[in-house]
Amino acid sequence: MKQMSMESGKSTQIVLIGGGQAAAQAVQSLRMGGYSGKLVLVGDEPVLPYQRPPLSKAYMKGEFAEERLFFKPAAWYEDNGVELILSTRATKIDRAAQIVELEHGAMLSYDALIICTGSRPRPLPAKGADLENVFDLRGLSDVDRIQPNMVSGRRLVIIGAGYIGLEAAAVARQMGLEVTVLEMAERVLARVTSPTMSAFYEKEHRSQGATILTGARLDHLEGENGKVSAAVLADGTRLPADIVLAGIGILPNIELAKDAGLTIDNGIATDRDARTSDPRIFAAGDCASRPLVHYGHTGRLESVHNAIEQGKLAAAAILGKPRPPEDCPWFWSDQYDLKLQIAGLNQGHDEIAVRGNPDERKFAVFYLRNGTLIAVAADSYARLLSANGESEKALGVLENFLTHAGPNPVVSNLAERIRAGEKLDIRRANARQGAALSVYVPAAALAAQSQTDLPGVYYAVALRLDPDLHAARSLWADALDTAGRSGESIQMLESIPVSSPYYTSARGQLAWALRRDEQNEKALDLVYRTLASNPDRDLKIQMGDLLRSLDRDGEAARVFTEIIEQDTRENRSDWRLYYARGALRETLGLWPLAEADLEKALALNPNSAEVLNYLGYSWVDRGTNLEAGLDMIRRALTLRPDSGAITDSLGWAHYKLGDIETAIGYLERAVELSPGVAEINDHLGDAYWAAGRTTEARYQWQRAITLVENQDEIEDLRRKLLTGPKPYPAQAQRP
């Protein structure tokens, strides 16, 4: 079976497990995306879904009321038809029956399931960890237990100098506690940042009165009358303690998924659409591992940004909508009056460049591998190289960024200027521009937490300081659109002038906003007019996608052809364009041209499961290149072993080759993986008929009829109920 995306409109009930950022985002995106069926959110805590980052900061200090933690008020869930089942733990997932079992025996059926079970603190492996006043910090109840003990003059020992440990240390010092931080590694934040940044934060904490002990290993905790009284190090050092806070990392909550037989790989394994090894089940947030498309490997990210992005990806896949952009990973940490911001992953760097002065508390650290920026800001580094006369190296940095991180209007603009022979200058912000950036950054952080009012205030201030900060207009528009304020979003996008590097990307945002509002012709006209004066490649691709979404396949194919021809002139090849055009050409009945495109896409990306399956299935379905098609599908299934669509393709290939029993085995597995797909049920019916299992065949065809809406397809299935299928293989001919 060829499958470009999950069909929309089939789900009648979606269940979400979890009450954190990922679940809250998925619920919001599903409703904003037009899903009108039942939504049920199951959370094991007694409160509304809430954000966790403020727990170790503003909330612990008492500056943040509990209700400000909630993503949405209770009325929002009621108004939007979201059923909340709180203080309840999900205990089992029955994948075959598509049921979630809850404690106390209740059961919930699902058409799609999103697992957002998050993570839990890694337990402290030391004697005395069970003493009173020894805490970890993950949820609201943890802070509520810790807060009464945060009294000026008390002695707090924090074990672990990661984000949580250092944020808690900063809060505790501001509240007047004596703070000692123990870190086994030789520096703080060793897992996430550079020695330069580590040294800066160590110095900052010591200047604020905290004691930082690196290379310090805890041996055990001592207690008096059941309460902790001291932390004892491996070298015998005894540190008096009234409170101990353990912050030594987290563990993903994967047990529910593992017991259900889902694939586990440092978390619940998902694809780029947040889909697990069961196509009906998705996972998002701390519990999920995902393809890190900018870095070429999989991993698990523990961040607000990741949870939001995966929540959006899961919702889009369920609704059958285009995949949202996958941004560069982003993290932040608030300590005292400082904000540490990290863009990208720095693992594997072999060079560090520091810009600014740490002594002035204003600086950035750039991470490079083989001369290529892998974290922080590609535009700044490229500007520096260009200003120093290293234009080719600067262009290489920018092109590498675009290849791995996807479209970016500023980076694309800089690349074009360098190609045109321009020598870039080092950007120096004036006081107002610097102030605008200092406001814009927290606005982006708040928007990432789905708070739509407060970020707007920050964005407005940033734009008052620097009206040319068009990145703020673009992000503000995105936040408004996510919040359902499409009119304001459109107005904001329309305010970005043609002179801005964000202009063309804003036109693309605006077109899709109009498309979602079903103003289809207006969306297309907008893009056509923009391209007439700004022939931007990324916008052309969006034009092709827009046309394809409107079933205007011929026009979409022509647009992709124009882009491919332009790429050829520039010695560039993108397998995704050939794949997209090939699928369109097949739909248009231009199989020889489609076949050439698919073969080209495969040559450019030999390990694409999508292309291997699409081309292999196409050959098999046409009765040509059967053995080669079969081999391709086998390779695709090796890459995606739990794909119902690919499993169906392999079963259908065996059917076309006359190997009916093998076909039935694969097709039964495909129906198990994707029970709601009509084509797969239809194929299994054909195979049953060929094996003489006519009653079972008619059952599968009858089931397929309930899953399709096209009247011609329904009539074809009804004819099968009377006469059986076309006799593809000789074995399929049955009276």
Image (cartoon, rainbow, N blue to C red):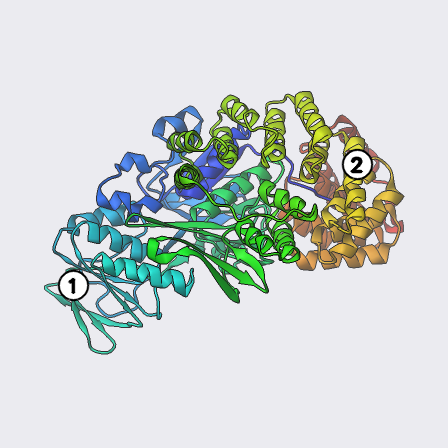
- Residue 504 in picture, x, y percent from top left: 63, 33
Whether residue 107 is visible here, answered yes or no, is no
* Residue depicted at x 49% and y 23%: 488
Amino acid type of the residue tagged 2 in the rendering = Ala
Q: Look at the image and tell me in which quarter the N terminus lies.
A: top right
Secondary structure under the numbered disc 2 in the rendered image: helix
Against 267, is 551 above or below? above
Mark 2 — residue? Answer: 557
Image-quadrant location for residue 323: top right
Against 459, is 354 above or below? below
Q: Which mark is residue 596?
A: none
Extreme residue in the bottom direction:
235
User: Front-most of 697 and 88?
Assistant: 88
User: Front-most of 556 and 213?
Assistant: 213
* Residue depicted at x 48% and y 45%: 428
User: Front-most of 304 and 120?
Assistant: 304
Q: Could you give the CA–CA distance between mark 1 and mark 2, rounded to whole angstroms?
A: 69 Å
Image-quadrant location for residue 255: bottom left
Mark 1 — residue? Answer: 241
- Residue 457 in picture, x, y percent from top left: 38, 30
